[in-house]
Amino acid sequence: MDVVRLVLDLLYPPRCPFCGNVLETWEEGMCRRCQTNLPWMQTDGKRVEFCEKCLSPLWYQDGVRRGMHSYKFRGGRDHASLFGLLMAQCLTDRWGEPMDCVTWVPLSARGLKRRGYDQCQLLAQQVGQRMELEVVPTLVKVRDTKRQSSITSPSARRANVSGAYALQEGADVAGKHIVLVDDVATSGATLEECAACLRMGGAEKVVALTLAQTKK
């Protein structure tokens, strides 16, 4: 271990993103208790239009909700490595076909400026690195929307994101099999909107991949 990391571990001990317990090293990612007790998904997820499947390693509840909230709203960008690993393992286990590339559900320019990083892009980069797949930007968010988590009605969620995304100018998706990364799948409305853009651009298959999703 280098001196800088040792000092950081002493000043800011690494914690499990799901329960907050202190870890021995950053490399562990999460504590052994959470490895056993997290709400692991054992089946394929919800049906999302324009996607072959919607895959996630975890249900969005309890400690998983805490971990994602920390990742998105408390500057916990270091969690991307662990989250991306879990997502890549899920894709390997539950999708047997080869894919051409990985892309992500993007933030708007205003959202990116406010947060300082695009959490879905970081996840996509981790998945692509572990799956040895090219990570390419294909979508843009053309208008700001309300946070989907603040809207309870499925129809209102769809209305909120309708027309909010578009295929990036010059994006070459024709005939490709694409992994579409988002952080959490709730109603699936955002994934549907983005997948529709990819399919209209000529993508042959789209597989949605998130860290977690809500139960039906």
Image (cartoon, rainbow, N blue to C red):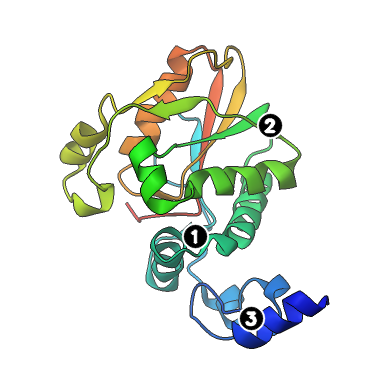
| CB atoms of marks 1 and 2 within 8 Å | no
Other-residue count near label 2 (Cα within 10 Å), few / some / many at <14 / 14–19 / ≥20: few
Indicate which disc residue 58 carries.
Answer: 1
| On screen, residue 91 above or below 212 | above
Which residue is at 53% across, 28% downward?
Answer: 206
Q: CA distance from mark 1 to mark 2?
A: 21 Å
Residue 161 shows in the view? yes
Q: CA distance from mark 3 to mark 1?
A: 16 Å
- Res. 113 image quadrant: top left
Query: Horizontal and vertical percent for residue 153?
Result: 16, 46
Which residue is at 21% across, 36% downward?
Answer: 160
Indicate which disc residue 97 carries.
Answer: 2
Q: Amino acid at mark 3?
A: Arg
| On screen, residue 28 above or below 121 | below
Residue 108 shows in the view? no
Query: Horizontal and vertical percent for residue 120?
Result: 50, 45
Which of the two labelled residues, at mark 3 and mark 2, occupies the earlier sequence position? Answer: 3
- Res. 33 image quadrant: bottom right
Instruction: Give the residue pinned by disc 3.
Output: 32
Q: Amino acid at mark 1?
A: Leu
**Circle 1: element type:** strand
**Circle 2: element type:** loop
Q: Nearer the viewer, residue 56 or 125?
A: 125
| On screen, residue 147 above or below 139 | below
Q: CA distance from mark 3 to mark 2?
A: 31 Å
Query: Horizontal and vertical percent for residue 112?
Result: 41, 44
Left or right of 8? Residue 161 is left
Other-residue count near label 1 (Cα within 10 Å), few / some / many at <14 / 14–19 / ≥20: many
